[in-house]
Image (cartoon, rainbow, N blue to C red):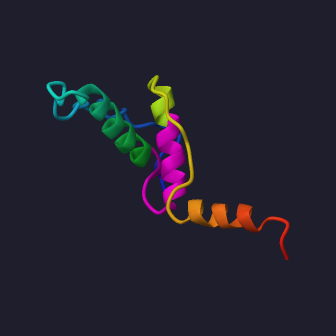
Amino acid sequence: MDTRDDTASEPAAPAVARRDGPDWGHLPHGNLTNQIIGAGFEAHNVLGAGFLEAVYANALTVELRHRGRVAASGPTGNKGRAEKRRRQNNGKT
């Protein structure tokens, strides 16, 4: 029989200080580069591994918009070509 008290909670782990990563601010688009890379890591950290590329692309778009950047979502990978073919063949049998 398990004698542990399930209602007792363990103390929360101390927050880990987040590093901002390398400072690319000296480059012409360094701050934008930092935000894009950071958004990509954040999207992957939240989702984890194992999703299709389109899921990560959507999450990156959401994260960039959350950070105040204009981000256009669009087809990724082979989907764009397949969508173009579907539109061209629409109405044809």
Residue 33 percent location from the top left of the image: 28, 34
Q: Which residues lie in the magenta part?
A: 46-62
- Residue 74 lies left or right of residue 25; in this view the side is right
Quadrant for the C terminus, please: bottom right
Main SS, magenta residues: helix
- Residue 30 lies left or right of residue 81; in this view the side is left
Q: Is residue 52 above or below residue 63?
A: below
Q: Nearer the viewer, residue 45 or 9?
A: 45
Is any part of residue 91 visible from this angle? yes
Q: To which quarter of the image does residue 87 belong? A: bottom right
Residue 58 belongs to the span the image colors magenta: yes
Q: Nearer the viewer, residue 4 or 69?
A: 69
Q: Report the residue at 23% width, 29% height from top.
A: 30
Q: Is residue 7 above or below residue 67?
A: below
Q: Nearer the viewer, residue 16 or 14?
A: 16
Q: Report the residue at 72% width, 64% height from top.
A: 88
Tally of numbered discs: 0
Residue 53 percent location from the top left of the image: 49, 58
Q: Report the residue at 50% width, 39% height from top.
A: 61
Q: To which quarter of the image does residue 91 belong? A: bottom right
Is any part of residue 17 visible from this angle? no
Residue 66 percent location from the top left of the image: 49, 27
Residue 89 percent location from the top left of the image: 76, 68
Residue 34 belongs to the span the image colors magenta: no
- Residue 80 lies left or right of residue 3; in this view the side is right
Give the farthest residue toward the bottom: 93
Q: To which quarter of the image does residue 35 belong? A: top left
